[in-house]
Amino acid sequence: MDKYSGESSEKQNQKRKKRKRQRAIIQKLTEELRTVCAVAICKASRAVLHRMGRGGTSFPGKAAMYLKKDLLAVVSQDVVSIVVTGTNGKTTTSAMLESALRHAGLEVTSNRSGANLLSGVTAELAACTDWRGRAVKHYAVIECDEGALQQVVPLLRPAVIVVTNLFRDQLDRYGEVMHTLEAVRNGVRQMPQAVLCLNADDSLTASLALDLPNPVFWFGIGAGAGEHSQKSAKNPGQDSIQDSIQDFKRESGQDAIQDSVRKPGQNPAQEKQDFSISDARYCICCGTEYEYSFRTYAHLGGFHCPSCGYARQEPDVEVTSIDSMDYTGTQVRMRFEKRDAGQMSVRIAAPALYNIYNAAAAVCAAQAAGIPRPAVLQALGSTSGTFGRMETFETGSAAAQMILVKNPAGCNQALDYLCSLKEPYSLILCLNDKDADGHDISWIWDVDYEKSCSHSFLYGIYVWGMRAEDLQLRLKYAGASESRVRLVRKKETLLKVIRSSKVPVFILPNYTAMLPLREMLQKETGKAEFWKENE
């Protein structure tokens, strides 16, 4: 009886194991079929959208993820990826890195349109696979939204994560900057083996190294270069204008009001400077106000806490001097290792101070990923603008340059760049308040438009967009006369302005305002759609 019972039990165990193997095979085949169908839907919908003249950056990913939620993990299995996140500079830094990989002779994909949520990243990677979902390009540079980092990172498993900087941005979406910092920290925490490339000059970004186990490489701009950048950004006529404003305040009694709300011991001359570093004025560790040995812009620079000692780290990659800067680009000297006496002259095709930071971030990430230095330097010298970021369109008798702005820090830097120009130009400011922009547009009151309104080379100002009237009001308070600011209702009118302009035109839109203007200018100039450039 025991013998038969034992045989029966053994047969039952064998049957259970067989059924388990069968279920595993069926599950595997089902997942493979889901992958095949998801990839097919992604590619088909993307092709249809391209034929319709649309980008196909997000919807194909959403459709594919409906069938297979973790599709990104499958299509990125054999891909070495670099992820770039942060408030400003993601797209340009990613473009520089993509170009570096191409100069190194490597097949690379990227989400160059800026579709940086999980659906956009999934769509881009899935489009670069065979029918079974296996990667055909084995390197990727992925721009990732700060809030989406914790969704993307565990699926993509990047080798390198770059954090460019952190500023206030879209308050109704992200909240205060500390919430954004925590979102980035939670994302990086899920990939402890990834190399972190951090901005040494940003006290917020640098704090990620305090409690994360990841290996860290640092980039930044040195003290000498930082001092040069502050001097070059000054408007020659600004001091006299500020003197006039101060005279008016004294005559009208406003100085007394200012003094009544001023903190004890605060220097009135430092009010503007203190305000500009309000994103990170106090030590993230102990709450003491930072001291600076130098500043580049906003809260970036040689910060130091006099209480707890939290301070700027010595960068692995550092810009040691800014030799020249104009609208065609910047010539800098760069050091590539800590305590390395050797420096190299580097050409950065993208102009403006913030693009020097983007270049340093790209070099740092490239070194961390093992990309040859000559390929990186070639990329810096050839990457001038991408998808609305310092992108130039040749129309009519003068060029139009588009500079995406979406928060006070980025907008102030764009205006600093324009105020450094020594030739006449026209300015088009565009503002929407759609979901992708953030509905809170109060940030425009934190932008130093006064600087531009007093710039002697500014020829005329045009405002356009859903919130153009708000811009018009802001410029009135900035000192621009009503006759100097023209409100434009239709984007076609802007095209006529650009066509007929005898001086360069600079367009400063936020995200959803940039998209239709860029499409219009792309068609006007015969420029290839961004997805064709990426093929």
Image (cartoon, helix red, strand yellow):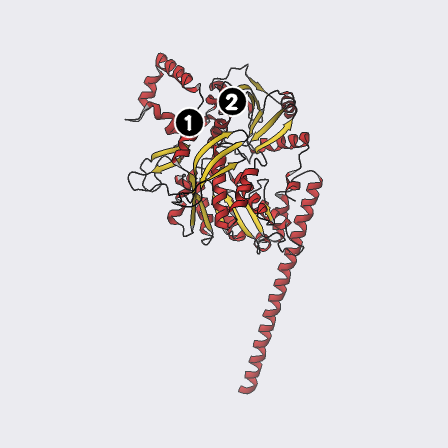
Of callouts 1 and 2, which one flags the residue occurring earlier in the amino acid sequence? 1
- The residue closer to the viewer here, 510 or 348, is 348
Residue 304 location (% of width, % of height):
33, 38
Residue 122 location (% of width, % of height):
59, 48
- Local packing at callout 2 (Cα closer than 10 Å; few below 14, some 14-19, many 20+) is few
Kindly tell me whether residue 170 is visible in this rendering: no
Q: Using the numbered discs, state the Cα–Cα distance from disc 1 to disc 2 in whole angstroms.
A: 15 Å
- The residue closer to the viewer here, 422 or 510, is 422
Q: Quadrant of the N terminus?
A: bottom right
Using the rendered view, name the quadrant where residue 19 is placed: bottom right
Kindly tell me whether residue 99 is visible in this rendering: yes
Q: Secondary structure at mark 1?
A: helix
Q: Secondary structure at mark 2?
A: loop
Q: Residue furthest front?
A: 342
**Residue drawn 49% across the image and 46% down it:** 365
On the rendered structure, is 56 left or right of 163? Answer: right
Label 2 sits on what residue type?
Lys
The answer to whether the residues at label 1 and label 2 have Cβ atoms under 8 Å apart is: no
Q: Which residue is mark 2?
A: 422
Residue 71 vertical placement versus 25 (above, below):
above
- The residue closer to the viewer here, 193 or 9, is 193
Residue 174 location (% of width, % of height):
47, 38
Label 1 sits on what residue type?
Lys
**Residue drawn 65% across the image and 48% down it:** 42
Residue 482 vertical placement versus 159 (above, below):
above
Residue 231: which numbered mark, if any? Answer: 1
Using the rendered view, name the quadrant where residue 339 is placed: top left
**Residue drawn 38% across the image and 35% down it:** 223
Residue 201: which numbered mark, if any? Answer: none
Q: How many marks?
A: 2
